[in-house]
């Protein structure tokens, strides 16, 4: 194998080992290193160390940016919670859930918290003595009940709230009386702050270089294929003319 071939092979082996280490297959990666050494196949240790350090640095930077964004979202959420801006709150809430990891944003804990937040805003007019706004708030809550995940129906504590829109004056109903107490409002606010404060952001580490090569290869193949199709179409048109 010529010098260029050795260099290419070393680069390929390095890319393979880098991917295996990134994917958490350390034993397989170590086995590949040992096999390369046993067969006299080259790979670059310096390149591996450099790539690993670079990925870790980018991952730390991405994590810091993601956590900063979550901090800003939490501030906006708490401000909307305190001022009773329901529409703005749930718009920010959806953004926050998209930025948190899939596993945490779809857990029963997250769904239950979201349910209670809807209860909070649905009862807000009565809590502040604005009875004229109560029917609209209950209509919004009814729509939420119609579209929320059926998984919340498995939480026993939430079941009474399915009747909330149909109770004329929930402030005097034993099942809903705690919702109108300041202690309940503070406790829910603390749960909201704690849920997002755990930094469950998706901090995917930077992907290995092999992904870039695959993307470039697919893009190049697609471009070549399109060119060949265009060339064949042109040739077919010329044949037809003849």
Image: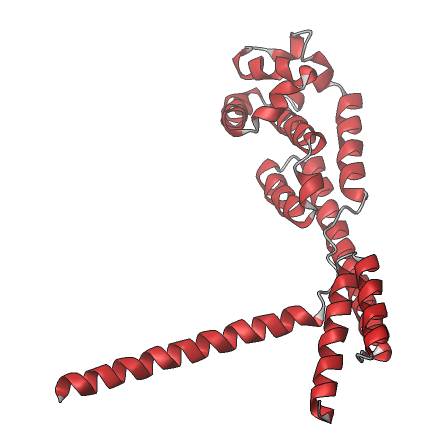
The correct choice, above or below, for 30 with respect to 102 in the image is: below
Q: Nearer the viewer, residue 90 or 109?
A: 109
The correct choice, above or below, for 7 with respect to 24 in the image is: below
Q: Colour scheme in the image? A: secondary structure
Q: Nearer the viewer, residue 23 or 152?
A: 23
Tell how many labels.
Answer: 0
The correct choice, above or below, for 205 with respect to 3 in the image is: above
Q: Position of residue 102 (x, y in %)?
A: 67, 44
Q: Position of residue 189 (x, y in %)?
A: 76, 32
Outermost residue toward the front?
39
Q: Nearer the viewer, residue 80 or 221?
A: 221
- Residue at 75% x, 55% y is 203
* Residue 59, picture quadrant: bottom right
Quarter of the image that includes the C terminus: bottom left
Left or right of residue 168: residue 59: right
- Residue at 80% x, 67% y is 32
Outermost residue toward the bottom?
3
* Residue 19, picture quadrant: bottom right
* Residue 93, picture quadrant: top right
The correct choice, above or below, for 215 with respect to 227 in the image is: above
Q: Nearer the viewer, residue 78 or 132?
A: 78
Q: Position of residue 91 (x, y in %)?
A: 59, 44
Quarter of the image that includes the N terminus: bottom right
- Residue at 65% x, 12% y is 171
Q: Position of residue 172 (x, y in %)?
A: 66, 8
């Amino acid at each position: 194998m010529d010098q260029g071939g050795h260099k290419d092979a070393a680069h390929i082996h390095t890319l393979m080992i880098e991917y295996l280490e990134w994917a958490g297959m350390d034993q397989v990666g170590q086995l590949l290193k040992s096999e390369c050494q046993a067969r006299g196949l080259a790979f670059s240790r310096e390149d591996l160390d450099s790539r690993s350090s670079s990925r870790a640095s980018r991952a730390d930077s991405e994590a810091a940016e993601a956590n900063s964004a979550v901090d800003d979202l939490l501030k906006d959420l708490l401000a909307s919670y305190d001022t009773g801006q329901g529409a703005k709150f749930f718009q920010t809430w959806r953004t926050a859930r998209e930025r948190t990891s899939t596993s945490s944003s779809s857990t029963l804990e997250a769904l239950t918290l979201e349910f209670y937040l809807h209860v909070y805003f649905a009862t807000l007019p009565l809590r502040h003595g604005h009875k004229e706004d109560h029917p609209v708030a209950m209509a919004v809550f009814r729509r939420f009940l119609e579209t929320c995940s059926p998984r919340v129906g498995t939480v026993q504590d939430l079941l009474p709230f399915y009747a909330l829109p149909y109770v004329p004056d929930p402030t005097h109903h034993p099942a809903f009386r705690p919702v109108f107490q300041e202690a309940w409002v503070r406790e829910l606010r603390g749960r909201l702050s704690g849920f997002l404060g755990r930094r469950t952001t998706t901090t995917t580490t930077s992907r290995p270089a092999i992904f870039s090569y695959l993307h470039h290869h697919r893009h190049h193949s697609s471009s070549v294929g399109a060119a060949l199709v265009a060339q064949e179409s042109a040739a077919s048109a010329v044949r037809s003319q003849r």
